[in-house]
């Protein structure tokens, strides 16, 4: 029986009350503060001031805990809008915002579909808004947008982590590497790259995300007519 269907242990008097919801909320807070690698059942038990074995009445494995954490974040993703483009845009933006609040979330999505109740509700909201679109292209549409969002947020979060590790923000890092690029461009081997670096508009992360998403949605619109 999956964790979503498995009942919790009966309530009993205890110095530290416990529930699956409390375990998951605490795990999410711990991951937000210290990173996913710091989340273990033993550390979680210590934070909750309970014995580690007590957690196993609610969660069998760490993988189950991670599934529950991912589904908890899916509760924050509520696509809105009236047409397919509005809804897919809303889904993309809400997913990105959730990943920015919970950086570890981006590390756990992109594999097999999440089947928790909140993830299913998110999927239902999106697919209901696509009613009228050819059923054979609905899932490829949603999958394409999901793939774009996952790639974009992973890149953005990788930049955040690089900033923290190096102590240099993007502009400082570019300034540090600038002299090297000048030397490389002076060889004449990279004229197209030099033109783009020198002349193209430099968009911030928000602008880059919106432009890329619009490119994708424009293509979808052209394909489905």
Image (cartoon, rainbow, N blue to C red):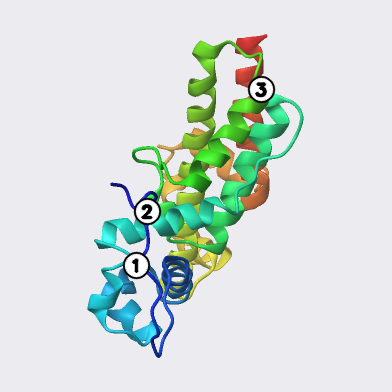
| Mark number displayed over residue 123 | none
Percent of width and height locating residue 204: 65, 52
**Distance from Cα at disc 1 to Cα at disc 3:** 50 Å
Image quarter for residue 169? bottom right
**Distance from Cα at disc 3 to Cα at disc 2:** 33 Å
Check disc 3: other Cα within 10 Å, few if <14, some if 14-19, many if 20+: few
Percent of width and height locating residue 54: 28, 76
Q: Which residue is mark 1?
A: 9
- Left or right: 214, with 193 as reference point: right
Given this view, does label 1 or label 3 mark the residue nearer the observer? 1
| Mark number displayed over residue 218 | 3
Point 28% across, 73% down: residue? 41
Q: Which residue is mark 2?
A: 67
Of 93 and 114, the residue lying toward us: 114
Given this view, does label 3 or label 2 mark the residue nearer the observer? 2
Of 158 and 139, the residue lying toward us: 139
Mark positioned earlier in the residue sequence (2 or 1) = 1
The outermost residue toward the right is 82
Q: Quadrant of the C terminus?
A: top right
């Amino acid at each position: 029986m999956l964790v979503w269907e498995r009942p919790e242990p009966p309530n009993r008097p205890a110095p530290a009350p416990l529930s699956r919801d409390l375990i998951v909320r605490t795990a999410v807070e711990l991951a937000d503060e210290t990173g996913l690698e710091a989340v273990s059942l033993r550390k979680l038990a210590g934070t909750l001031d309970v014995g580690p074995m007590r957690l196993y009445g609610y969660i069998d494995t760490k993988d189950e805990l991670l599934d529950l954490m991912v589904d908890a974040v899916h509760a924050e993703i509520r696509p809105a809008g009236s047409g397919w483009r509005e809804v897919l845009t809303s889904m993309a933006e809400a997913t990105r915002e959730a990943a920015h609040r919970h950086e570890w979330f981006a590390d756990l999505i992109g594999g097999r579909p999440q089947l928790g109740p909140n993830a299913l509700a998110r999927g239902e909201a999106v697919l209901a808004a696509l009613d009228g679109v050819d059923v054979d292209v609905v899932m490829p549409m949603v999958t394409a947008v999901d793939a774009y969002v996952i790639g974009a947020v992973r890149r953005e979060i990788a930049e955040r982590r690089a900033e923290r590790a190096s102590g240099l923000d993007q502009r400082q890092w570019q300034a540090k590497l600038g002299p090297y690029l000048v030397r490389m461009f002076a060889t004449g081997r990279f004229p197209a790259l030099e033109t783009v670096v020198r002349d193209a508009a430099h968009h911030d992360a928000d602008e880059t995300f919106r432009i890329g998403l619009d490119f994708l949605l424009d293509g979808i619109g052209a394909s489905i007519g």
